[in-house]
Amino acid sequence: MIDLLLATNNRDKVTEIRALLADLPIRIVTTGDVGGLPEVVEDRETFEGNASKKALTLAKAAGMVALADDSGLVVPALGGEPGVYSSRYAGENVTYADNNRKLLEAMKDLDGDDRAAYFTTVASVADPRGVMGTAEGRVDGVILREPRGEGGFGYDPLFYHEPSGGTFAEIPMEVKNRVSHRARALEGAKKVLARLVEGNLE
């Protein structure tokens, strides 16, 4: 069994990632468990850049394998916003509701295909020597005019996923974890982690 540091302070992400990696013989460690780790500024212009920077920085600081992801919502009709700024779309230290309100305001005059959007995640696995692999996941949907559902987090209450028949805040977590952008990215990351586990057993 190997220890894996999840390079995020977001408790909702930790919950999702724990569930998605539950079938691997991995001991999940959070940044709170380790303590004293540096804050990583997400200043790259791409999801992959941010994910790889976080994973490698914290892997070196903690001396262990780290998994980081950078995720966001992309609305093509808004020129790709919120994009890499999804978590701070309405500013620093804002709530999910603040970001959702800003998005609805920005899209108030958009109809039809212009309300199309997609979630994307890039997951990166690194050890102290370097990035070992990255994987990307994407899921397409539509932004509703008002939030629906009590589950999920972030933009989930606004993101309607037609194949699932509801927003990501309405469908059960186990359903979301089968179809989400993060699930798809982590499927790729799991292959990297599985090779690590196998190497540890040899």
Image (cartoon, helix red, strand yellow):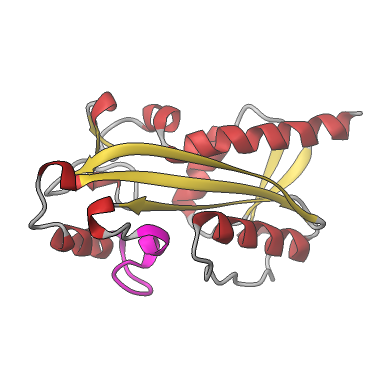
Residue 50 lies in quadrant = bottom right
**Quarter of the image that includes the N terminus:** top right
Give the percent coordinates (x, y) of residue 92: 37, 74
Q: Quadrant of the C terminus?
A: top right
In percent of the image, x 86 and y 33: which residue is there?
Answer: 199
Residue found at x 18% / y 46%:
115
Residue 85's spot in the image, x, y percent? 39, 64
Q: Identify which residue is drawn at 77% across, 32% down.
A: 195
Q: Is residue 42 magenta?
A: no
Q: Is residue 196 left or right of residue 28?
A: right
Residue located 35% across and 51% down the image: 73
Is residue 153 in sight in this rendering? yes
The reply, left or right, for residue 88 in relation to residue 106 is right
Left or right relative to 111: residue 46:
right
> Would you say residue 21 is visible in this rendering?
no
Q: What is the tally of numbered marks visible in this picture?
A: 0
Q: Name the foreground residue: 90 vs 136.
A: 136
The one nearer the camera, 99 or 113, is 113
202 w.r.t. 75: above or below: above
- Residue 189: where, in percent of width, then height? 63, 38
- Residue 176: % across, % down: 38, 32
Q: Residue furthest bottom?
A: 92
**Magenta segment boundaries in residue numbering:** 83-96
Compared with 1, 32 (above or below) is below
Residue 84 sits inside the magenta stretch: yes
Q: Quadrant of residue 79?
A: bottom left
